[in-house]
Amino acid sequence: MTSRLLLVSPAIGPALREARFYDGSSSIDEAAATRAAAGALAEAARVVLSPGARCRDTAEALGLRGAVAAELGPLDAGQWRGRTLAEVCATEGEAVARWLADPDCPAPGGESVRQVCARVGHWLDSLPEGRTVAVVEPEVVRAAVVHALALPAETFWRLDAPPLTATELSGRSGRWNLRLGRPLGGE
């Protein structure tokens, strides 16, 4: 049997709007728009969530109840957590440039792109058969796509997962098909 995974990017919130390294506490500010998409998701055997408030609030607005999966947490920005990209670039511009260019370079005290891809990939490889809906941060969507399609980790930052879109993976470990960026409520 096939595994079907619908990765839902959360609604936009202040952290995303401000280009702030996510610290898990920022919520969403589009609850009404999110509630309007509530009927767009097919029933699932499992619902899982990234640990942050934005994903929990999006799931709630969509009428989903699920378990938090720590392995689906956002890319750990370490010492940059809670700061804006502009603030970090002003004081640590070279470190940010290395972090963005080299998938093996972690944020200070955080993790690298390659590490988040491996963490999410391990979870994806253990996905049971049936339909799973996962409300996860955009970087988790990127990491899942990189792993599922065996893309080089260098492509991570070139993938975009807009707010309130669904990225669908179907298949099983080693053989995945991809459908990207469907707006919730769209065909």
Image (cartoon, grey):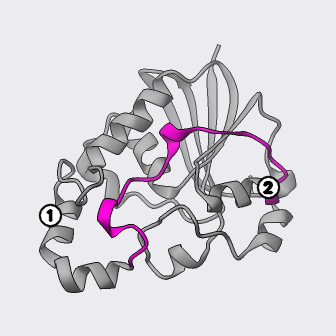
Q: Give the residue type that dot 2 points to.
A: Glu
Q: Is residue 102 left or right of residue 142?
A: left
Q: Give the residue type that dot 1 points to.
A: Arg
Q: Which residue is mark 2?
A: 60
Q: Which residue is mark 1?
A: 98
Residue 166 percent coordinates (x, y): 63, 52
Residue 120 percent coordinates (x, y): 44, 37
- Location of residue 13 with respect to 2 vertically, above or below: below
Q: Is residue 25 left or right of residue 153?
A: right
Is residue 148 visible in this depiction of the protein? no
Question: Which residue is located at x 39 percent, y 36 percent?
Answer: 119
Q: What is the spatial separation of the Cα atoms under label 1 and label 2, in whole angstroms? A: 37 Å
Is residue 157 visible in this depiction of the protein? yes
Q: Earlier in the sequence, mark 1 or mark 2?
A: 2
- Is disc 1 placed on a helix, strand or loop? helix
Q: Is residue 43 left or right of residue 107?
A: right
Q: State yes or no: residue 67 in magenta.
A: yes
Mostly what secondary structure, the magenta segment? loop
Out of 38 and 176, give the one closest to the viewer.
Answer: 38
